[in-house]
């Protein structure tokens, strides 16, 4: 197999992994709604613990502990992963809170903004050049947020925080050059001491104490490991195979599913304030998509 064929295969694999990641993230709110009687912090703690357990079991079967040992000899890489673990924990916590407090539309908007945020990060930190249409798309998204700020007097803080934390997470994971499963295992391992400390200090008062829960509830909490790890593995695998700007393009899938769920299944209110901002963001995404298609055609002709 020559170099170009291998590169094409890896590129296609990256695209499939990205689609899988965002489809799974799109339907994830259904799972978290099943846990809406439990606080966001407690759900986060279980996400960390069971993701770590799931990753250890997975690597026991498919291997990879050798790469883990090599990573411990690279303090700079570990330092970056400690930052990504904090970013992803913050992102998880805010997302769980948004879903279980009827702010799923805000979460959806955050993940619609994120692709355009990725384009800016790619330009600022990875020397990726913005084309004219991309600049126009980013400007429209910025206007959408500013309209909400000026006309309605509110900043979509949840949306911007979700977009920002996940954007920087993707950027740092791309920079760290660690494979998906090793990186995720290290991230969850770094969060484990905090998670276990919280779990043991709140055993008496926790609404999700595994000592008193029903079997169904305990199984639901343990499933957090799979719900968390599988899409993140797909995402991290995609991030190392395709450009950051292209990775952002596929992210429309997740928030689109979330948006439909929020309005149709969970009856969240879609008011004028959100409507105006969404129209600007969607317009920006249409232009961004058009630019991607035109660029792809130019490459094929070339």
Image: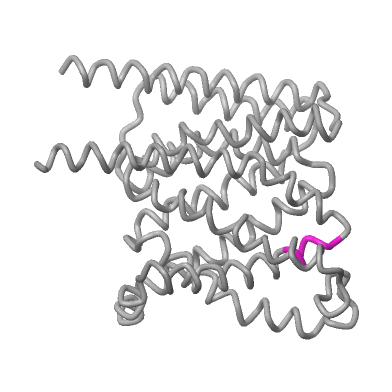
Seen at 64% across and 43% down, the residue is 160
The quadrant holding residue 50 is bottom right
As drawn, is 82 to the left or to the right of 218? left
Identify the residue at horizontal 86%, vertical 31% (top origin). Answer: 267
Q: Is residue 218 above or below residue 255?
A: below
Residue at the location (77% across, 68% down)? 218
Q: Which residues are magenta?
A: 38-43
Q: Is residue 79 left or right of residue 190?
A: left
- Residue at (70, 84) in percent of width and height: 197
Q: Report the front residue among 34 and 204.
A: 34
Q: Position of residue 251 (x, y in %)?
A: 52, 36
Dominant secondary structure of the magenta stretch?
Answer: helix
Q: Position of residue 266 (x, y in %)?
A: 83, 35
Classify 7 as above or below 190.
Answer: above
Image location (x, y in percent) of residue 275: 75, 22
Establish if 166 lies above or below 9: below
Q: Is residue 40 magenta?
A: yes
- Specify whether 272 is left or right of 123: right
Q: Is residue 262 magenta?
A: no
Instruction: Determine the image quadrant of residue 255.
Output: top right
Q: Quadrant of the N terminus?
A: top left
On-image quarter of the C terminus: top left
- The colour mode here is one colour
Residue 301 in picture, x, y percent from top left: 18, 14
């Amino acid at each position: 197999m020559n170099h170009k064929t291998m590169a094409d295969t890896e590129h296609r694999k990256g695209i499939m992994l990205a689609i899988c990641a965002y489809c799974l993230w799109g339907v994830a709110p259904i799972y978290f709604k099943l846990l809406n009687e439990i606080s966001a912090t407690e759900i986060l703690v279980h996400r960390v613990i069971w993701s770590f357990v799931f990753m250890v079991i997975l690597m026991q079967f498919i291997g990879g502990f050798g790469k883990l040992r090599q990573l411990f000899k690279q303090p700079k890489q570990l330092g970056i992963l400690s930052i990504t673990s904090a970013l992803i924990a913050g992102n998880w916590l805010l997302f769980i809170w948004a879903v279980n407090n009827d702010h799923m539309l805000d979460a959806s908007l955050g993940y619609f903004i994120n692709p355009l945020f990725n384009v800016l990060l790619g330009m600022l930190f990875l020397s990726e050049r913005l084309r004219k249409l991309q600049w126009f798309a980013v400007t429209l998204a910025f206007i959408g947020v500013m309209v909400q700020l000026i006309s309605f007097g509110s900043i979509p803080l949840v949306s911007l925080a979700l977009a920002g934390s996940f954007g920087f997470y993707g950027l740092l994971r791309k920079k760290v050059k660690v494979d998906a499963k090793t990186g995720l295992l290290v991230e969850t391992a770094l969060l484990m001491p905090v998670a276990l400390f919280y779990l043991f200090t709140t055993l008496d008062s926790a609404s999700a104490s595994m000592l008193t829960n029903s079997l169904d509830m305990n199984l639901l909490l343990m499933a957090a490991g799979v719900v968390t790890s599988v899409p993140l593995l797909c995402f991290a695998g995609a991030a190392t195979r395709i450009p950051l700007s292209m990775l952002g393009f596929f992210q429309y899938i997740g928030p689109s599913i979330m948006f439909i769920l929020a309005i149709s299944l969970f009856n969240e209110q879609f008011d004028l304030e959100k409507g105006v901002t969404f129209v600007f963001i969607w317009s920006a995404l249409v232009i961004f998509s058009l630019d991607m298609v035109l660029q792809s055609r130019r490459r094929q002709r070339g």
